[in-house]
Each structure stands twice: as structure tokens, then as C-alpha cells.
Image (spheres, rainbow, N blue to C red):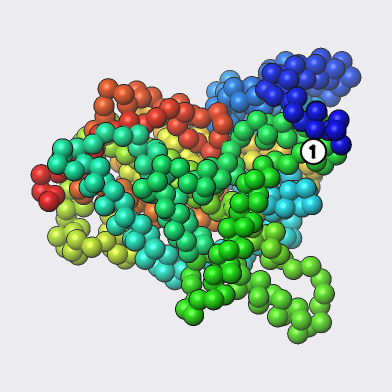
Amino acid sequence: MELLEIVKSAMDTHSVLLIFLSVMVYLLYVYRDKFHYWSKRGVPCQSPAQSIVRTFRLVLRMDSFTDNFYGVYKAFDGHPYVGSLELTKPILVVRDPELARIVLVKSFSSFSGRLKSPDTTLDPLSNHLFTLNGEKWRQVRHKTATAFSTAKLKNMFHSLKDCAREMDAYMERAIGDKGDVEFDALKVMSNYTLEVIGACAMGIKCDSIHDEETEFKRFSRDFFRFDARRMIFTLLDLLHPKLPVLLKWKAVRPEVENFFREAIKEAASLKESEAAARTDFLQILIDFQKSEKASKTDAGNDTELVFTDNIIGGVIGSFFSAGYEPTAAALTFCLYELARNPQVQAKLHEEILAVKEKLGDDIEYETLKEFKYANQVIDETLRLYPASGILVRTCTEPFKLPDSDVVIEKGTKVFVSSYGLQTDPRYFPEPEKFDPERFSEENKEKILPGTYLPFGDGPRLCIAMRLALMDVKMMMVRLVSKYEIHTTPKTPKKITFDTNSFTVQPAEKVWLRFRRRASTP
């Protein structure tokens, strides 16, 4: 046990770099035949050296996930797919919209896997929709999808409004008599979205809007963060999938796991003592578990529950993380583009005034549907900054690619570069231009299927997409109705992506100025 601790403590970034380079030399010699997997099959591919460098840059956080695969997308113009390697394992990068549709939707049964199924003993909180596969994924997905029905979203909207009012108060205090305020938009929007997720996920207050740093904020951020621990986990898993188990190396830090376990246990205990039923996500999962237990008891069935405590913990933890940073980033990117495109901001403000004049100042769930141009702004923002710039699926059975003799073998990972497709000038002319008119009623029908995938597509489409869009739209409309949003000398000219995040996040602070509108008291 002492030796294991020494190995763990020695594995800092520099040690990993040395180990990685040594392993590369070894692999190049021992597995030299495997490095020609794709070329032997006549598939356009990266050279072994290019594949190794790409993997090296990704694992050591030199590239963001989005940029890493976008580099492959750009380098193979004219090809529908590209072969590459994760060390010795073949992977396929898709850069054709029709093939993307085949993988994500039309032939989903052949590509229903996502990431490797977790070792539930080692990493109990890794039991969530991002990692579950097969029948367990189908069961959990089917049940949890009902938590985001229209009726449930209407109930969550009340919690969202309470958080929005708290955000209004924060903004007014920050602006005070000065009339304007400058701050890092991502930080402030992250505080707001975490408060929303706390209310909608567990029916709790995270106290994040007014607090600089809270435990919920820190641990939610760390749940999916690609930090040094996860980097080492990824490297070990690439070398051999049993290595993390052998070395007892968790992807999720023990303190993060313990925090969510205790938070969920405490929230569940409080719910038991409450007279009124709650409608938050945790309550819905607890109700599923109770119903399942009762059903199995009545039937005399002693098989394992689908909604175990570990599944509930993993789903809630991933919901916190996936609903916190990506939603905050989407909202920040919207505000950033509105500040850089004042004519778009002016048009959005005109729409807000028109809707409020027609339906009143208070924004309700049904009112949100009236903000058509706001939808266009959000859609165009997500084209430039998708929630995830790369979509991954795992082939679950041999699959012959259309119009070719190439067969994708079971277990092969397939990556769809959604960012590449969404910024390709063949599908979106002047792709770097922010133009919400691409998504107007008359233009959105012209968008080629498979070229716009900000939340994925098919059965593994982001389950909380509607909640995230409702959240972004609600806060964007409220902010634009009250404040003019401007760039500052510190505002980045171009957004670069964070290399420490699986999702699309800005690498730098996004400074914006909010000026109270003359008509706003």
C-alpha cells in the first residue's frame, strides 16, 4: 500500500509527461503494425506520429477537446471520415453531416455506446447518463426523461424565476448610483446558473449569487473538470482499461464524491420531513426509487434496483456539473456576442419591448415562446459555441460504412466534430460572422440536417436541453430589457477554449460592461 501511495504522489504533470513519452517510444516499437490499422483498410488517416501527438496534446491538456478534433476536421477537407488512434486503439472522426446523422440517429442501435461503462465499485458516482450503456442506460434515460416534460418544466420555472429575481437584486446593488458596472460575465453567470441548478436539482439554495466561493460551486466545477487526477486516469485507461482499477485511481476526487453523497443524503432526509411534495429532480428520482422498490417487493423480485443510491448520486452530480458550467458559458457567449454586435442587441431589445407591451412586464413560462428573435440569438450563439464541440459514440456491433467496404469494428470510438460542421463555410457561409438571421423562420429550413448539433442528436441528445435553453433565454431577456451590454478594453477579441474542460468554456475572463437603460428605474 505504501508503494501505491508513493506512485500516486509522484504522478505530477511532469512525471506524467516523462511516463507518456517513454510509453510512446515503447508502443511505437511493440505495436508498430497496429499503427497502420486505417491505412491498411484504405481509410484516409493521420500518420502514427500525428495520432500520437494529437493524443499527447489532449491528455496533457495542451488542446481543448473541441480544438483537438477540429484540427483533424480541418486537415482532411473533402473526406467524409478520418482514421486516427488513441495510442494503439483505432478511432474514427466523422466530418460529413449525413454520416453524422447515421451514427447519431439513423443507425443508433449500432452506435448506442458512449464512454466506457464505469467500474461501479471504484467510481460509484460515475453512474450517470454520460457513462452508462446498454439496458441500464435505456432504463435510466427513459425514466429521467420524464423529469423534463412540459409539466415538470413549468414547475421548475417558478424556481428559475425566484433565482432570476435574486440575480436582479445583485445586479442593481452592483450598479448602484454609478449607472453601470464592469465584471467577468462568466463568473457572474456561473453564480446564477448554479443557484438555478441547486433549486431545480435538489430544491436547495446554494447561496452562490452573492457568495464568492461556496462548496457547491467548487465541487460542481470539479465533478467533470479535466484536472490532473482525471488526466492520469485517462492515461492509465488508454494504456490498459484495468489499470485504474488495479491502482485504485478514481476519475472523481474522493472529496467531490463525499460532498455529493452527503449533500444528497441531507437533502433527501429533509424531503422526508417536509409535508408538501417537492418537484425538483432529486425528489423525482427518489419517487422512482420508492416506486421501483414497492414494485419489486410486490412481485417478490430481488434483482438489483435500477435507481440505486449510486445511480441517483451519479445522475444528480452530473446534472449539477452539466447544468452549471455549460449553461453559464452559453449565457456568457450570448452576452458577449450581443455586446460585439450592437445592432443585434438593439433588435432584441425592440422585440422585448413589443412583447412586454402586449403581455405585460412579468415573464412567465408561456411568455417565453413569444421571444422569437431571442431564439435566433441563442441558436446562432450555440452554432459558434456548441455545448460540446465533439460528440463521441462507441460502435456496439460491426457496421459497414455506406458506399464503401470499410467495416467499423465493435468497440471502436467514433467522434463527430460538431464544432467543425457548425463552422464549415460549405454549410454556414461566413461562419465566423454572428448572424441570427440564419435561424429565422424562412432560413432555418435551409440548414442541412447533421450540420447543427449543439446538444448532440438522436436518443442520446442532451436530456436537460429544454431546461438549459429556458434558463439562458429567461436571463438573457431580463438582462437586455434592463441593461445595455458593451465590450470593454479587457473584452477578448476572440474566444479561445479552456483546455481543462470537457465542454466548451472560455479560456479567459469575459469582461463586459452593463449600463442601466434610461427607461429602467
Q: Tell me which corner region of the image, top left, top right, bottom left or bottom right, holds residue 75.
A: top right
Q: Which of 211 and 508 is in front in this view?
A: 211
Q: Which of 390 and 185 is in front in this view?
A: 185
The answer to whether residue 211 is seen in the rendering is yes
* Tag 1: amino acid: Pro
Q: Which of 192 and 272 is in front in this view?
A: 272
Q: Mark 1 points at which residue?
A: 244
Residue plotted at (45% across, 32% down):
506
358 is higher (above) or lower (below) than 211: below
344 is higher (above) or lower (below) than 482: above
Q: How many labels does the image show?
A: 1
65 is higher (above) or lower (below) than 142: above
486 is higher (above) or lower (below) than 13: below
Residue 450 is situated, as x and y percent measured from the top left of the image, at 53, 43
Residue 79 is situated, as x and y percent measured from the top left of the image, at 61, 27
Residue plotted at (65% across, 24% down):
60
Q: Tell me which corner region of the image, top left, top right, bottom left or bottom right, holds residue 7.
A: top right
Residue 447 is situated, as x and y percent measured from the top left of the image, at 43, 43
Residue 215 is situated, as x and y percent measured from the top left of the image, at 52, 47
Give the residue at the far right of this rendering.
30
Q: Which of 88 and 163 is in front in this view?
A: 163
Q: In which quarter of the image is the N terminus?
A: top right
Judged left or right of residue 514, residue 287 is right
> In what element is the residue under mark 1?
helix
Residue plotted at (14% across, 41% down):
177
The answer to whether residue 82 is seen in the rendering is no
